[in-house]
Image (spheres, coloured by chain):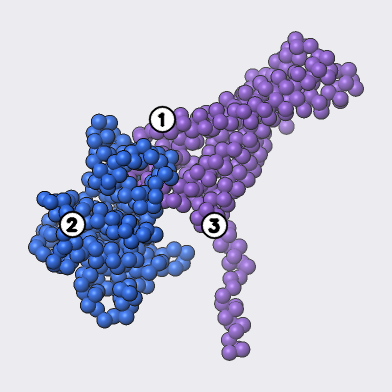
Chain colours: A blue, B purple
Amino acid sequence: MNTDASSAPVISFENVSIGFDQADVLRGLSFSVAPRETKVLVGESGTGKTIILKLAAGLLRPESGAVHVLGRDLSSMTEKQLLDFRRQIGFVFQEGALFDSLTVADNVAYLLREGGVAEDEIEARVRESLRFVEMEDALEKLPDELSGGMRRRVSIARALVSRPRVVFYDSPTAGLDPVTSQRIITLILRLRDSQGVTALLATHRLQDAFGLANYRFDAATGKILSAPENGRRPSPGAPETNLLVLRDGKSYFEGSPKNIADSQDPYLHRFLV
Amino acid sequence: MAATEPKLIAQSSPSVAAAIAEAVKKSILAVQDYSLLSLQSVGNLFSPPHYVGDMLEQMDLIGVGSLPIVLLTGFFIGAVLVLQTAAQFERFGQTALTADVVSLALVRELGPTITGLLVAGRCSSGIASELGSMVVTEQVDAMRAMGTDPTRKLVTPRVVATVLMLPLLTSMADLLGLIGGYMVSHFTLRLGAVAFWTRAMDALEFSDLMMGLTKPLVFGFIVATVGCYQGLSVRGGTQGVGRATTAAVVGASVFILVANFFLTKVMLFFAGHTL
């Protein structure tokens, strides 16, 4: 624990185990996520990707092991402390999980209103967040008037409105067409490179990881450019994308997208096809 | 192979005792979870934040929304009571006593119970399906992920709204029941307004009113907490929401009828009736 604070992991799982209905989902899983790193969790359905995100957000408690996020041991926190802690993170749920009785603007403003932020500031920040996801003209719409992709974008806007240091994405591209999926990945990439957030992203699409590793957002020009480093850290502190492949409740592979592409492992190749 | 088959079957099928033990364990856990949720819903009142806006919205949905069916039902319950009792009293030439019966039966028993059951049917199911849908679509998790306690935001406003609204709805049901009773007694028994209303009012004691207005407080608590518990415990997608809705109505209705018996017993004791 003598690690330099700036390079200390933002998220760390130590021997985490959890099960449901007498079936183990995670069995002694350990991994960590460095500042500004995007860790992409890849695995088949039921391998515990969503569970990992919920553990990292303190929505579930591990049966054994420890989960540290932003320097806090979530396993030892009370529910009240966890509620306060969660205001510092962003969570994008699989289907968006927008409050269906609230308008888009009210959904995005929810966290700010709960925090007692002044209405003038709320309006400005809601517009800023919706502008970021290119949904500013949908302010007064209800979630059921939006397409699946639009709901995900609003969900991303809702997650980033509090300017979190850590964002968890649960299958943000699941069930979307390739064009919309790419648009969502571009948004995540822009959020990573413009605001330097650390992220955990669960997906079963390896393309999402390659998209994040192979491109970068240039804030100066506002354009998406190729990242020649192909996911490897170009310089200290620069965003890095790594993969964690899950199998049977454990880490099966951890490395960069390039490593997985170069691998001859037949199980990993199933995700490449 | 043939020798191993019986062993495999024996291993895979749990014994009856184990199945019963599992069912008992699940029931005890459910009672524990329900009790904790109920306590938490009340405990939330003593510390901020309070969601007053949500509370008023629920009061409108539960109170104003239930008013038409409560009024209609109350009216016809009062009317049918007169029809049923008038024939008996006519035999003794005591038709004026119908006012006493309608008044006592409505205020002490039928008003609170029928209103409780109606609101259970309408609101317990509504609460369970609304919260259940929110669980299934991860809206409750999203709420928690944004630092909001769902019991404060969703449960306490519904509990407070139902507890406050049910006595008012019961009062309205009682009034409409008496009006219904009066109208039927006027047209069938030719009972005058003064005779009916004087007897109806004289028949009531303060303890009757207390009983009639205390019961709805408890019934309101049951309706809201059972609905919220079933909604927040939903498992198994949309099918689970359907099951929770049914369980909420059945659970709340049975709970109301059982609680009614014990409340009546206790209140009669305090009113000096030693039954």
The residue that label 3 is drawn on is: B26
Mark 3: which secondary structure? helix
Of tags 3 and 1, the one toward the viewer is 1
Mark 1, chain letter? B
**Label placed on residue A16:** none
Q: CA distance from mark 3 to mark 1?
A: 35 Å
Q: Which residue is mark 1?
A: B52
> On the rendered image, what quadrant is the C terminus of chain A found in?
bottom left
Using the image as rendered, state which of residue B55 and residue B65 is in the foreground. Answer: B65
Q: Quadrant of residue B77?
A: top right
Distance in Å between CA atoms under marks 3 and 2: 54 Å
Q: Is residue B37 above or below residue A6?
A: above
Circle 1: element type: helix
Q: Amino acid at mark 3?
A: Lys
Same subunit, labels 2 and 1: the answer reads: no
Looking at numbered disc 2 in the image, what kind of residue is underneath it?
Answer: Ile
Q: Nearer the viewer, residue B64 or B103?
A: B64
Q: Are marks 3 and 1 on the same chain?
A: yes
Q: Which mark is residue A224?
A: 2
